[in-house]
Image (cartoon, rainbow, N blue to C red):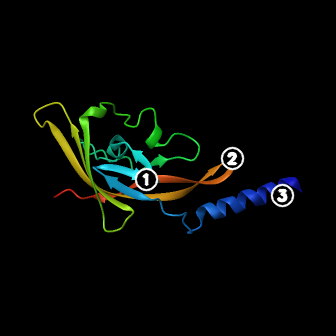
Amino acid sequence: MKKVFLCVAKVAMFISLTSFVRAAEPIISIDKHQLIVNGQPIPSECLAQLQTKLNGDNTIAALYLIHPEYRGCSNANIPYPAGNVDRVSTELRQGKNPRIVLAKICSMISGSMGSYCDRIAIEIINVKYLTQKGIRNAVIARKLGDLNNG
């Protein structure tokens, strides 16, 4: 009987995770090109991970800004795994929808080009995350698309 109950509980959790009901929307603001989500400043290097690379690699669609159990990008030991944090800059502005951020992300590179910039639309949303303690909210940045010319 205990095994049946546990199985039913797991199925119920899965159904609630996959339901279309969303968690409360995160509180988003931009202050001097600094993204602030639920009162936490998000390092610009976090959003730089969503940048399409100069070689055309576009492999990261979303990332955790605030994670319910582990470090999200907002408090990660290494928010920009590519390193060279000082070689990244961002310009941010709020979109028409309060959850949308329009970002210009520039990376300084070696060689004659000097730098490469990418303009992207990012949606900041709460999502459900299953933990050992139950369902918790996580805040993610999801790349919606490129805004580059051509």
- Could you give the CA–CA distance between mark 1 and mark 3, rounded to whole angstroms? 40 Å
Q: Earlier in the sequence, mark 3 or mark 2?
A: 3
- Which of pointers 3 and 2 indicates the residue nearer the eye? 2
Instruction: Determine whether the residue tagged by mark 3 lies in a helix, strand or loop.
Output: helix
**Real-space Cα distance between discs 3 and 2?**
18 Å
**Badge 1 or badge 2: first in the primary sequence:** 1
In the figure, is residue 30 to the left or right of 76?
A: left
Q: Quick check: marks 3 and 2 in contact, CB under 8 Å?
A: no
**Which of labels 1 and 3 is toward the front?**
1
Q: Residues within 10 Å of mark 3 (few under 14, many from 20)?
A: few
Rate crowding at label 2 as few (under 14), some (14 to 19) or many (20 or more) other CA atoms within 10 Å: few
Q: Is residue 131 left or right of residue 96?
A: right
Quarter location, residue 84: top left
Quarter assignment of residue 57: top left
Residue, x 49% and y 53% (percent of image)? 139
Quick one: label 1 or label 3, which is nearer the N terminus? 3
Which marked residue is nearer to the observer: mark 1 or mark 2? 1
Give the labeled residue for mark 1.
37
Q: Residues within 10 Å of mark 1 (few under 14, many from 20)?
A: some
Residue 31: x %, y % from top left: 31, 52
Look at mark 2 in the image and give the residue it sits on: 132
- Spatial distance from mark 1 to mark 2, Cα to Cα? 25 Å
- Residue 89 versus residue 140 in the image, above or below: above
Residue at 33 percent of width and 54 percent of height: 30
Q: Residue at x 45, y 32 (%)?
A: 77
Amino acid, disc 2? Gln
Say what secondary structure mark 1 lies in: strand
- The type of residue carrying mark 3 is Val
Q: Which residue is mark 3?
A: 4
The image position of residue 55, as x and y in percent, is: 24, 41
